[in-house]
Amino acid sequence: MSTVNVLKSDGSIQAVPASEFASQPIDPSALAADALSRMAQWISEFEAKIIGPVSPAEQLSWAEKEAAARAYHGSSASAEQLTLLQAEAGLTGETLADLSTKIITQADAFRPIVGMIAGLRRKTEEAVNLAATDPQSDEATFDAILTAAQTQALTLAQQLGLSV
Amino acid sequence: MANLSDLLPSAGGGGLEPIGSLLEPSNVAAVDIALPTGYLFFVLYVWHFRTNIGGAKLAARLSSDGGSTFDTSDDYAHAFSFTHTASSTVWGRRTASLIDYLALSEDISAGSPYYSVLDDCTSRIEIYDARNSAARTKLNFQSQTAIGDPAYNYHTAQAVGGGRKITAASHDYLRLFTYQNNGNPLIAAGKIQLFGVPE
């Protein structure tokens, strides 16, 4: 029977069975689930910092507004699209041309951000899921994956001129 | 201006007093610390604590038979929060579970470059109701340790939490040990001193 040494508080050394210190099994899949949850929370906070205080309902209208703005600039806006733009312009006092230009500018700036976040989410999920299949993975493994993703997100955001 | 000693409670009058000698483990699997009677509660200080395998975790178990055996079943209720700050990055981990040990820290360094940003672990562990057979022994801890991330030059990691036994019993020994899911680390170095507040 193999033994290991234990230091007692009276300063003596006692040999005890090594089996008492068998490695504690850690389930990497549980750690992966925790890591994915933390990643989702962090990305939500990251998105909120970039997008600002916009309701989900308003976000859903963005694609429609962009299509209307592009149609307006192409002189092909339908009556429904003109109504959509006029409803906002009527409140802000902007001309339809100015509003459409602003919408297109914002949409063009937002598109790479959305792509970056989606790419980071997928890349990180893949790394986490891969680590979950490795029995050697522990908390530090998943922490390192998240740290790398966060570092990359911050770097990409700075490259896009965003302050987060 | 008052002397500092005037402001501190004196030993035996409600202040902390050292129990036993300073322990300096060297390449041992664990440190077993006697918890004598006659104290309201204990505080265990651990510093310059290092393991022979990087990324090890520090944990504790309790004994009620003089250190002959230590409770290992799912008899500890446990909560653990881990905070990592590096540049502008902050996140936390919170776990709560029934477990067969009380975790006190993680990512303890072996001095290798990967884990050695803070290069050792310090921890303050409060132990309540250890010798009260009618109460559940409770531990609170605050640990400062390394974090396994080589990307930053300056950062800190802090683990806080606590736990208790599910059942009431008098516990006369506490075992500090390290573990890892891919090895059995040894406590390579460190200093450990138990203090207590006398009844």
Image (tube, coloured by chain):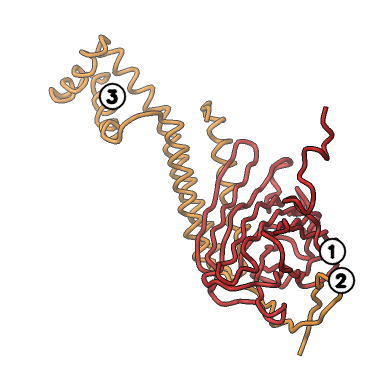
Q: Is residue A132 left or right of residue B152?
A: left
Q: Is residue A91 above or below residue B6?
A: above
Secondary structure type for disc 2: loop
Q: Amino acid at mark 3?
A: Arg
Residue B176: image tag? none
Instruction: Identify which residue is drawn at 31% across, 12% down.
Output: A98
Secondary structure type for disc 1: strand
Q: Amino acid at mark 2?
A: Gly
Q: Quadrant of residue A16?
A: bottom right
Q: How far apart are the two marked residues, 2 and 1, measured between alpha carbons? A: 7 Å
Q: How far apart are the two marked residues, 3 and 1, measured between alpha carbons? A: 74 Å
Image mark 2: chain: A
Contact, CB < 8 Å: mark 2 with mark 1?
A: yes
Few, some or many C-alpha atoms within 10 Å of disc 2 (few <14, some 14-19, many ≥20)? some
Residue placed under numbered mark 1 in the picture: B23
Residue placed under numbered mark 3 in the picture: A70
| Viewer-closest of A54 and B39 | B39
Residue B20 drawn at (x, y percent): 83, 64
| Viewer-closest of A77 and A134 | A134
Q: Colour of chain A?
A: orange
Few, some or many C-alpha atoms within 10 Å of disc 3 (few <14, some 14-19, many ≥20)? some
Residue B73 drawn at (x, y percent): 56, 77
Secondary structure type for disc 3: helix
| Viewer-closest of B164 and B96 | B164
Instruction: Identify which residue is drawn at 85% across, 76% down.
Output: A13
Q: Is residue B33 above or below residue A51?
A: below
Residue placed under numbered mark 2 in the picture: A11
Image mark 1: chain: B
